[in-house]
């Protein structure tokens, strides 16, 4: 009888230890994702002054912001480069 209770106690302890480990792993992943999100937001915010400086018309600014929001930083940078190239060709 005592042996059965000890086994049950160990199984419960093992389950609790396993659950605690999983919680710690999830907390670690949450922190990692939060940091990635903060980095992503910071990169997007860093582009806003460049958009204001490079885009001549409000329509270009709106287009650049739409690209930034829906397609991301890389696509926005590509759009801004294309705006600069078109401006140089026009001169």
Image (cartoon, rainbow, N blue to C red):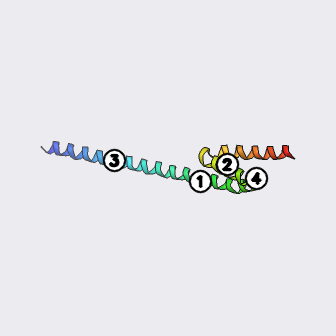
Q: Earlier in the sequence, mark 3 or mark 2?
A: 3
Q: Nearer the viewer, residue 27 or 79?
A: 79
Disc 3 from disc 2: Cα separation: 48 Å
Number of other residues with Cα within 10 Å of mark 1, as a class: few under 14, some 14 to 19, many 20 or more: few
Give x and y (percent) for residue 87.
81, 47
Q: Nearer the viewer, mark 3 or mark 2?
A: 2
Give x and y (percent) for residue 16.
30, 48
Q: Nearer the viewer, mark 1 or mark 4?
A: 4
Q: Earlier in the sequence, mark 1 or mark 2?
A: 1
Disc 4 vs disc 3: Cβ atoms closer than 8 Å? no
Q: Nearer the viewer, mark 2 or mark 4?
A: 2
Give x and y (percent) for residue 7.
21, 42
Residue labelled with disc 1: 41
Q: Nearer the viewer, mark 1 or mark 2?
A: 2
Secondary structure beneath label 4: helix
Residue labelled with disc 3: 19
Residue labelled with disc 4: 54
Disc 1 vs disc 2: Cβ atoms closer than 8 Å? no
Secondary structure beneath label 2: helix
């Amino acid at each position: 009888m005592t042996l059965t209770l000890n086994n049950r106690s160990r199984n419960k302890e093992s389950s609790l230890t396993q659950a605690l480990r999983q919680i710690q792993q999830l907390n670690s992943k949450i922190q990692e994702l939060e940091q990635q999100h903060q980095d992503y937001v910071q990169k997007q915010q860093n582009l806003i002054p460049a958009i204001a400086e490079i885009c001549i018309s409000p329509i270009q600014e709106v287009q650049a912001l739409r690209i930034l929001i829906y397609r991301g930083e890389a696509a926005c940078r590509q759009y801004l480069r294309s705006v600069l190239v078109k401006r140089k060709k026009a001169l």
